[in-house]
Amino acid sequence: MTATSSQPSETHKRPNYLLIWLYLFILTVAEVSLAFELPLSRNLKLLLLLFLAIWKALLVALYFMHLKFERWRLRVIFIIPIPLAIILVSAVIMEHVR
Amino acid sequence: MTHGTQVLDQMRPPFPAEPGAGVYSSKLGMWVFLASDVMFFTALIGSYIVLRFGAPGEWAKPSAVLNVPLTAFNTFLLICSSVSMVKAYAAIQDGKKYFLRPVPGKLLRDGGLKFWLLVTMICGAGFVGVQLIEYFKLVHHGFTPAGFREGSVLAEHAATDPIRYGAAVAGLYGSTFFTMTGFHGFHVTCGVISMTYLYFTKVLPEKYSPQDYRGIEVIGLYWHFVDLVWIILFTIVYLI
């Protein structure tokens, strides 16, 4: 996103922020409806809710935090902890299951 | 120039460039901080998941104990604040330092940095306010970090329907719930305080310009991250 290293500037086409807000609103309504209204099995609900949450989180990270338009070396800083986080949680769960 | 000053100048990168990452230093610093915060929240959320699925009894149904509609409204408030934050960012990029300005031929006025940042601060403060109300109500009904208070409404409900109210693991539920949401609320409070400081020291005196709006970009990154974490927390704590 930065044209030079010394000043913040925008070189990409600006996303439609109100459209992203609308997506987030609709997804939140869908989440609440799914959790309390739809007669689905617990495991299916769990998967769908996690999918919707990750979708919303990605919208915020990519468009509001402009991660989509950043250089790779900056994206990596934010991406690296995510596999570490998954490993941490999985390891603790495995320990518990054992 | 003394020898000491020369050494100091050699050690300092040309302000404000950080050639390694290709971004200015305060933005890089914020990204590194956010990466560390991801791990912090992972520890909290991971503990919650492990304790919940490994608990000796069934966890309480979120809708039985928590006020989900109120929190859904709070989620909406935080999403709105994220949009207003990014609108503030876009406004200063376009050089709109003003509050509101009439647009010829249009009913609505055009919002500038001063307007959108104020909206963000109000929504953020609103989120903290609603969260405090939620806490007061929960404690009033008997849900505390130690579980259900003896003699409270929730303790009576838990005695009649121990499965639905997760009576066996109420202490675990209370401690993890208040730790996670409280820590997130602390982040939001810090964000509102930081934005208020920036508003009075930089935004109102019009110190930002389309050439330099680093403060707005950095606080914006923090604010969106807080929103992102809440999206995950809301699903895991209130809906699952």
Image (cartoon, coloured by chain):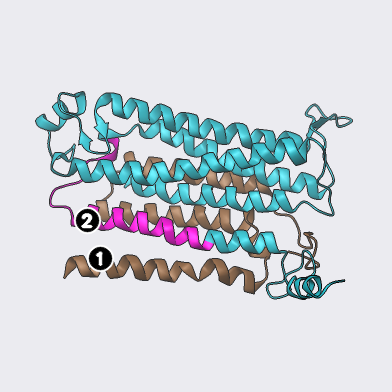
Chain colours: A brown, B cyan
Disc 2 vs disc 1: Cβ atoms closer than 8 Å? yes
Is B151 situated left or right of A1 in this image?
left
Residue at image position (64%, 49%) is B219
Residue at image position (16%, 70%) is A98
Q: Do labels 2 and 1 share a chain?
A: no
Q: Identify the residue position indicated by label 2 in the image.
A: B53
Is B160 situated left or right of A83 in this image?
left
* Label 1: element kind: helix
Q: Position of residue B156 (x, y in %)?
A: 14, 26
Local crowd size for mark 1, using a 10 Å CA cut-off: few (<14), some (14–19), many (≥20): some
Residue B55 falls inside the magenta stretch: yes
Instruction: Mark yes or no: residue B16 visible.
Output: yes
Q: Position of residue A53 (x, y in %)?
A: 44, 53
Residue B195 falls inside the magenta stretch: no
Mark number, residue B155 = none
* Label 2: element kind: helix
Residue at image position (81%, 75%) is B3
Position above or below: B72 against B30 = above
Position above or below: B58 against B47 = above
Give the amino acid type for the residue marked by disc 2 in the picture.
Phe
Q: Quadrant of residue B140?
A: top left
- Quadrant occupied by the N terminus of chain B: bottom right
Distance of mark 2 from mark 1, alpha carbons? Answer: 9 Å
What span is colored magenta in the figure? B35-63
